[in-house]
Amino acid sequence: MNKKKSLWKTITSSREASLLLILIVMLIVVEILSKGTFLTPTNISQIFRNNALTMLMALGMLCVMLTAGIDISITSTLAFTGMIIGMLQKRAGFTNTLVLFLLAALIGIACGFLNGLIISKGHLAPIICTMGFMYIWRGLAYVVSNNQWASGADVAKFAEFGKDGSVGPYIILIVAYVAFFIIMKWTTFGRRIYAVGSNADAARVSGINVDKVLIEVYTIMGLLAGLSGALSVSIYASAQPNMQYGKEMDVIAACVIGGTSMNGGRGSVIGTFLGALFYAVLAKALPLVGLDSIWQNLIKGVVVLAVVLINVLTQRSMDRAALERREM
């Protein structure tokens, strides 16, 4: 009995453990409903490949949301960067994969830096600032395209990196998640991000340069959005100004499902990975179990709300346990 209580207490006292349990249960249910056709190597590979952009950008969104901010311009940054990468290949014949990724990273850094600078120094609400840039970067993507798009033939060599069966996207994801796990858990920079999100005034009094941290997290978000722009061109073998339109909500949802607080100060890399994976599995599972397309968004919304509610209840349980320990 004590062991059962201890196991239940472990699950309910950890957002990551409760989400992992929900994910496992969902996988079992979907596998049964799909008659054993869901958990195949091909499907698992496709889940990660088709959601690599969301998973990668979720790391940047985690950093931004930990400071109680938000960035809804990310997919516009992705499109702007992706169009430049695509058009360089179409019009200039430039095909060096490494240089194209580095260029995408630099463009993303510049976009993110502008967000961070205006939010921190101009004291503009993140939602307003990033909404403005959402339209600016998307508009510039159309300007760069000049009513054209880069086809598979135009980006054929670059697409080798992200094609089906290539390890490229998986390497980027693994390196990114390992790096961010180390940074957020064991570095001073990671602790400063949590401190700013928990209480910006207290962080400022303790000597933390809050404006600098804000600029850094939005720059990181821009970096990952820029890399995602290049990765999108490589995975889908095309560059169009409307690519990933509206997908910023998927990135935010992945973070929220993973337990990241919209109020800042709470969230983890593991939770973000589980949240992004949960959302990816859900999106892949709904069509496979035979659910009509008109119901899929409804079911997706209900499930996401339910998982977020469980996260909230888990957090309250953790807060109560912490309060009890202090009182003892």
Image (cartoon, rainbow, N blue to C red):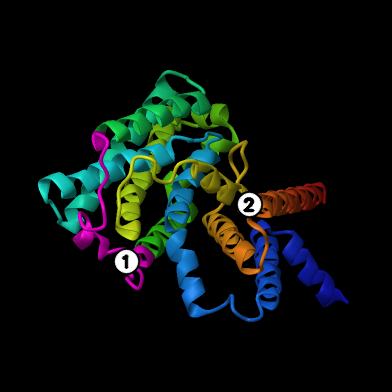
Give the residue drawn at x 53%, y 34%: 69
Give the residue drawn at x 42%, y 54%: 53
Q: Quadrant of residue 96?
A: bottom left
**In the image, is 70 to the left or to the right of 132?**
right
Q: Between marks 2 and 1, how big is the CA–CA gap? A: 29 Å
Helix, strand or loop at label 2? It is helix
In the image, residue 1 sits, relative to residue 132, either above or below, namely: below
The residue closer to the viewer here, 106 or 131, is: 131
Helix, strand or loop at label 1? It is loop
Boundaries of the magenta span? 144-171
Give the residue drawn at x 73%, y 50%: 302
Q: Is residue 139 magenta?
A: no
What residue is shown with label 1?
A: 163
Q: Say which amino acid is labelled 1.
A: Lys
Q: Say which amino acid is labelled 2.
A: Ile
Query: What is the crowding at mark 2: few (fewer than 14 residues within 10 Å), some, or many (at least 20)?
Result: many
- Image quadrant containing the N terminus: bottom right
Q: Nearer the viewer, mark 2 or mark 1?
A: 1
**In the image, is 110 to the left or to the right of 321?**
left
Q: Mark yes or no: residue 217 visible.
A: no
Comes first in the chain, label 2 or label 1: 1
What residue is shown with label 2?
A: 257
Q: Quadrant of residue 284?
A: bottom right
Query: What is the crowding at mark 1: few (fewer than 14 residues within 10 Å), some, or many (at least 20)?
Result: some
Where's residue 19, x and y in %? 67, 61
Where's residue 266, x and y in %? 60, 45
Q: Are marks 2 and 1 in contact (CB under 8 Å)?
A: no
Where's residue 220, x and y in %? 38, 43
Where's residue 63, x and y in %? 48, 44
Q: Is residue 159 magenta?
A: yes
The residue closer to the viewer here, 280 or 86, is: 86
Residue at the extreme top of the image, as rendered: 122
